[in-house]
Amino acid sequence: MTAFLIRRLLSAIPVLFVVTLVTFLIMWLVPGDITAEIAGPDATAAELAAIRERLGLDRPIWVRALAWYGDLFRGDLGYSYLLNRPVVEAVLERLPVTLSLTALALTLATAMGMLLGILAAVRHNTAVDQGAMVTALIGLSIPDFWLGVVLIILFGVWLGWLPTGGFVPLAEDPVGWARSMALPAFTLAVTQMGVIARMTRSAMLDVLSQDYIRTARAKGMRRRTVIFRHGLRNAMIPIVTVVGVITGVLLSGAVVIETVFSLPGVGRLIIGAIQRRDFPIIQGGLLVTACVFVFVNILVDMLYAWFDPRVRNDR
Amino acid sequence: MTAEPGTTAAPPLSLAQEVARARRRRRIVFLRRLLGHPSFLIGFVILLAFVMTALLADWLAPYGPTRIHFRAILAPPSADHWLGTDGFGRDILSRIIHGTRVSLRIGIFVVLFTGILGTILGTLASYISWLDGLIMRGLDGLMAFPGVLLAIALAAALGPSETNAIIALTVTFTPRTARIVRASVIVVQQMQYIEAARAVGAGHGRIVFRYILANALSPLIVQLTFVFAVSIIAEAILSFLGVGPPPPAPSLGNIIADGRTYIQEAWWITVFPGLVIAVAVLGLNLMGDGLRDVIDPRQHSTRDTGGR
């Protein structure tokens, strides 16, 4: 298992290299004078010159790339002139909200999706199966940010049951926190629930048609035990893979949903930075989110190897 | 002697003619199976309706999409304005009808460019071994950006416009498509008929285009229907965040963005364009599912939703 982990960590190096390179190059795509964008409309000529000096915009691009990597190794993602603070600080401070929203949505999506998928597989080719699959497909087709706004209108404006937005820290008021996270997490979960439901169903159908399932039934085991102990456990590997894919989708979904529900996460920071044209923050937020995703993927692979020993010893 | 009808007068066929005829017959069987598949048929009808709406927008829309009705600002749905009006007094139905054009254009171009780039990169990677590592590591790096986050950042850097949205989405969706092409080309390369073609002296170009790509095409087509669906949603996300096609020209996404200011008093601005997106995407998903079932009946309806 340790050898597998090391191999997996090494394979993340080229990925991180491309991620950092792309993040660096995005700045270079911006048309026009980026200094004025970074400094904001009120900057003086001296400030502009200072920024140009600091970013080394007069130097060739490969020198700037080297400087970018040098800063990265020292954990420096640049400085936001509009927020007047280092980018790392601003991003890391917002990260917990984004991560907790993603985790909450992932838990909800997995629970609802697996339930739906198992139900569909067990009642294969019945109305229950079809209903579950239609629900899953509709979930997949709904734009999540739109669903968020519609739920705000429904529960916030019309019924008045939940807040229309805003955030309450968990440490301050757990009930308020749950109320502020309920709609965003549910919104994100609905769209990804479908993916898990479909994968669970097909994996369960594959497993349930195996001979050992028939044997287990034939020797008089209870149906529920067969489905969960023999069926689900063996269907977990494809499900875990999808959960990995979905985490990425949820992470980027969280970025948009935070804006819809006014939650102070990395997403809202990035979107705010886009509106203010605060490029260091955009770069930093993008880079940190991508690194989180790379890390999650390693975690998923470890989980995968734990479920299936063949993966560990492969290659 | 009674011959079967249809074959009586037929002159003996050459081998090439025989092959062409068999190919045609197989194509007809395939189309018949496709149109007999309920999900594909429903999806196809929805897509057709969507395309017709976009093409006939000038005739279908009751008003111009940017025409301002001063007497009907934030008017709820009524006989004059079926889906109500927005904060400027513009007719929502007309804006939605014209907005479908933007979604369709973005969808078509992203599918086209993603398909071309994905095919080139995927084929190069699987065919030229020293390029494989380089291309695949690059694509892995691009796929490390979760969902449409890369597209959002790219669109923000390039500036809000339809062209830039297409560029941003193509960059985001090409890696997964290239991977799918590469995987299926690798499978086809090991088939005996490729060896046979090589043995009778077919050149690289002929082998790649005539045999490999032709046989590796189906997973790509299924993938592209999903790219189309995700592009429509992604356009809406970009516009909602203010980095998509800019107002006042309507797009399904920027109508929803307009509606955000008025969620307290005018739900119709938000609700209807989103419904249209959901129905269009549902149609494309149904089509993709149907295609996959018919092309590869062994595989169950599972799907890799990369990139939302």
Image (spheres, coloured by chain):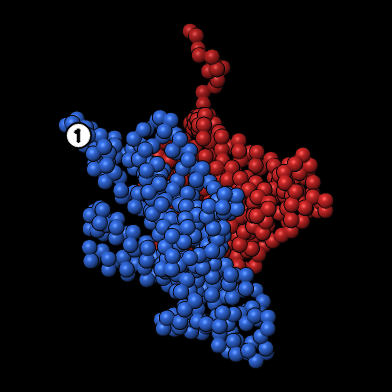
Chain colours: A blue, B red
Identify whether A106 is placed above or below A118.
below
Residue B25 locus on image (x, y percent): 51, 29
Residue B94, percent from left and from top: 74, 47
Residue closer to the observer: A302 or A174: A174
The residue lying toward the viewer, choosing from B235 and B111, is B235
Left or right of residue B211, residue B109 in this image? right
Residue B108 at x, y = what percent? 62, 50
User: Which quadrant is home to the C terminus of chain A?
Assistant: bottom left
Q: Is residue A230 toward the left or the right of residue B173 in the image?
A: left
Quadrant in the picture for the N terminus of chain A:
bottom left
- A278 or B172: nearer the viewer: A278
Q: Residue at x 47, y 49 (%)?
A: A190
Subunit of mark 1?
A
The answer to whether residue B117 shows anywhere in this view is: no
Please determine whether, in this image, residue A152 is positioned above or below residue A92: above
Residue occupying image coordinates x 44% and y 84%: A70
Residue that sits furthest to the top in the current view:
B1
Label 1: which residue? Answer: A221
